[in-house]
Amino acid sequence: MNKGNRAARAQLFQSFDALAGFRDLLAQQEKVIVPPRVLSEDEREQLDVTLAQVRIGDVLRVVFQSEDVFVEVTGMVSRFCLEERRIDIVKRKIDLLKVVEMEIVEKSRIENETEPIL
């Protein structure tokens, strides 16, 4: 196989973005900006109860402060570490101290996971 054919063949397998800016638009749609809020004592306790139930693989809806706005995201938990005060929803790293609301939308179907990962 000569060099020209290899280059042409390799080009077929390169990433192709048919709609310029489409991925950026999708990323913007993944987050919803919500009004700011301060947690009451009862809301903090409820958040602690929900955190105790979270497992890797669960689908969560989380509202948290990101820079100067509050953002709502929904996605699957890929990492959860109480020691680092961090939860990863897909590829987004969220500081647990900035979370103001959390809801388990769907529990993980992984049966071996009985304890949260610390």
Image (spheres, helix red, strand yellow):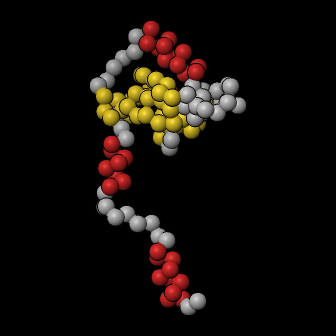
Q: Residue 10 placed where, x, y %?
A: 51, 77
Q: Position of residue 40 (x, y in %)?
A: 40, 10
Seen in the picture, residue 20 relative to 118 is either above or below; the reply is: below
Q: In front: 92, or 104?
A: 104
Q: Residue at x 33, y 44 (%)?
A: 28
Q: Indicate whether 80 appears above or below 37.
A: below
The answer to whether residue 118 is seen in the rendering is no
Can residue 78 be seen here? The reply is: yes
Residue found at the very far left of the displayed protein = 35
Quarter of the N terminus within the rendering: bottom right
Q: Is residue 3 above or below residue 82?
A: below
Q: Residue at x 42, y 22 (%)?
A: 101
**Residue 61 locus on image (x, y percent):** 44, 29
The number of numbered discs placed on residues in the rendered structure image is 0
Residue at image coords 31%, 61%:
19
Quadrant, the C terminus? top right
Name the foreground residue: 8 vs 111. Answer: 111
Residue 38 falls in which quadrant of the image?
top left
